[in-house]
Amino acid sequence: MASVLIPLAQGCEELEAVTIIDLLRRAGVSVTTASLDNKNVTASRGVVLVPDTDLESALQQNYDMIVLPGGLPGADHLDNDSRLRERIIKMADQGKYIAAICAAPKVLASTGILKGKKATAYPGVLDALDIKSEGSAVVEDGNIITSRGPGTAMDFALTLIERLVGVEKRDEVEKGLVR
């Protein structure tokens, strides 16, 4: 079974986090959500998310993919966590999937793994980091998958499903969503 780590930071974008978690679990993917600070996470619009575990415990396991929800200040908290940055670099070096949406691609840029890669993010997020942002809803470049924002969360999650468990499972999940 494919496994995914989704770190949740205070101030994350709840629509992105919940959509990604929900759709991956519908596809039968093992999803572990982890808080950076060992607390429940209050997302950017006040929704309280209850993580499965804390990041320190979650990092004891191996994953096929790591997915970073965006939102501010959530993405800033992700970017400032050295444990998370270290795991992202390690997984990228291993050729495992690294995915980020909205403001979270800034974390990938600051680790250096976006250098020379195509990516997208919330408008303006990557400009200050000297990364050219594509206009597409979801951009894939090798093992890196990025997406623009809350409005693209479903397409992003379906792309993650396709990469992890195949197009048939993606189609099955998408059919059940009645899009």
Image (cartoon, helix red, strand yellow):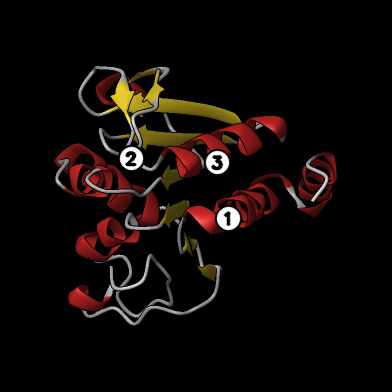
Q: Distance from label 1 to label 3 (Cα)?
A: 8 Å
Rendered image quadrant of residue 178: top right
Where does the image place residue 47, in percent across and percent down from the top left? 39, 27
Q: On residue 20, which mark appears?
A: 3
Above-or-below relation of 148 to 133? above
Q: Label 1 crowding class (10 Å Cα cut-off): few <14, some 14-19, many 20+?
A: many
Residue occupying image coordinates x 18% and y 75%: 128
Mark before the other along the chain sequence, 2 or 3:
2
Q: Distance from label 2 to label 3 (Cα)?
A: 13 Å
**Mark toward the viewer: 1 or 2:** 2
Q: On residue 71, which mark appears?
A: none
Task: Report the residue marked by disc 2.
Answer: 12
**Mark toward the viewer: 2 or 3:** 2
Q: On residue 156, which mark appears?
A: 1
Instruction: Check contact, mark 1 vs mark 2: CB within 8 A.
Output: no
> In what element is the residue under mark 3?
helix
Residue occupying image coordinates x 45% and y 79%: 134
Residue 53 visible to an observer of this rendering: yes
Q: Amino acid at mark 3?
A: Ile
- Given residues 89 and 47, the one toward you in this image is 47
Quarter of the image for the N terminus: give it.
top right
- Given residues 141 and 122, the one toward you in this image is 122
Mark before the other along the chain sequence, 1 or 3:
3
Residue occupying image coordinates x 48% and y 53%: 150
Q: Label 2 crowding class (10 Å Cα cut-off): few <14, some 14-19, many 20+?
A: many
Q: Amino acid at mark 2?
A: Cys
Residue that lies at the very extreme toward the front in this rendered image? 45
Where does the image place residue 129, in percent across and percent down from the top left? 20, 73
Where does the image place residue 145, in percent across and percent down from the top left? 49, 61
> In what element is the residue under mark 2?
loop
Question: Residue 6 vs residue 41: left or right?
Answer: right
Instruction: Check contact, mark 1 vs mark 3: CB within 8 A.
Output: yes
